[in-house]
Amino acid sequence: MTLCSLLAAGQRAVRSLAPISLGCCLILAGDGAASGEAPRAQHRVVVATGESDLERDVEANLEWQVNRLAAAGYELAAIMGGASTVIDQLLDRKAYVAGLVDHGGQIFVVMRRTEGALVRREYRLLHTRGASGVDEIVTPLGAQGFVLVASAHDGPVFHAAFERRTGTLPASYRVVRNRGGSSWMDEVQKDPAMTARLRRVVPMALD
């Protein structure tokens, strides 16, 4: 079993929601915003409302629900992961069957809208049980200006939310795995350009 890591360079830092020992990392270059009094906010909890058990339908419906609120000025605040058994019961999730039934998109997403000017956002959501194919998904997202803003683990599933706003600069992401006796960090250090841009590591999966 090999540890894998997702590396990224972008505009703003994202807090890791899982210990580094899980083996996946996100790296972002970011500006630190000055903290102040928190504005008043409204919150909404989002779940997929589609009836199909097919992974593509459940995940697409969740993303549609998130973007519907984003168009009204809400931003994605959190993905609720880490308590798979509880979420299974609350959402009546069926057992995973490869290619047929997947509850990857059946999770809770918290959206928040604060006082002030309306900022329109757009989101892309990732739900994966391993590192295979992740590069092909996140590479074009970075080029299109989507920046990782939240992540969570829900049992074997890794969830990530990428956000795009007007004026967002492109970011870059990369999946890095341990290779034999070489750790993912050893692999990163072989590329000086990547090492110079590395800002954050987010555990993703055992692959």
Image (tube, helix red, strand yellow):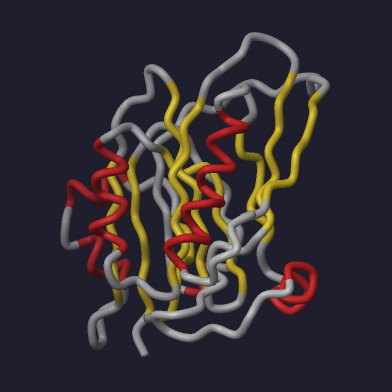
Give the side of residue 126 with respect to residue 185, left or right: right
Which residue occupies the extreme top position in the image?
117
Residue 166: x %, y % from top left: 41, 18
Residue 109: x %, y % from top left: 66, 50
Say which quarter of the image contains residue 124.
Answer: top left
Say which quarter of the image contains residue 186.
Answer: bottom left
Q: Which of 196 and 158 is in front in this view?
A: 158
Give the side of residue 18 with respect to residue 170, left or right: right
Classify the position of the N terminus by image quarter: bottom left
Say which quarter of the image contains residue 81.
Answer: bottom right
Residue 32: x %, y % from top left: 55, 28
Residue 17: x %, y % from top left: 61, 58
Q: Which residue is drawn at 70% across and 45% down?
A: 110
Q: Residue at x 64, y 28 (%)?
A: 74
Q: Residue at x 46, y 68 (%)?
A: 55
Q: Is residue 52 above or below residue 22?
A: above
Give the side of residue 57 with respect to residue 39, left or right: left
Q: Which residue is drawn at 39% across and 75% down?
A: 130
Q: In this view, does 30 lie above or below 61?
A: above
Q: Which of 100 and 81 is in front in this view?
A: 100
Q: In this view, does 118 lie above or below 125?
A: above
Which residue occupies the extreme bottom position in the image?
1
Give the side of residue 47 with respect to residue 180, left or right: right
Classify the position of the C terminus by image quarter: bottom left
Q: Nearer the viewer, residue 197 or 24?
A: 24
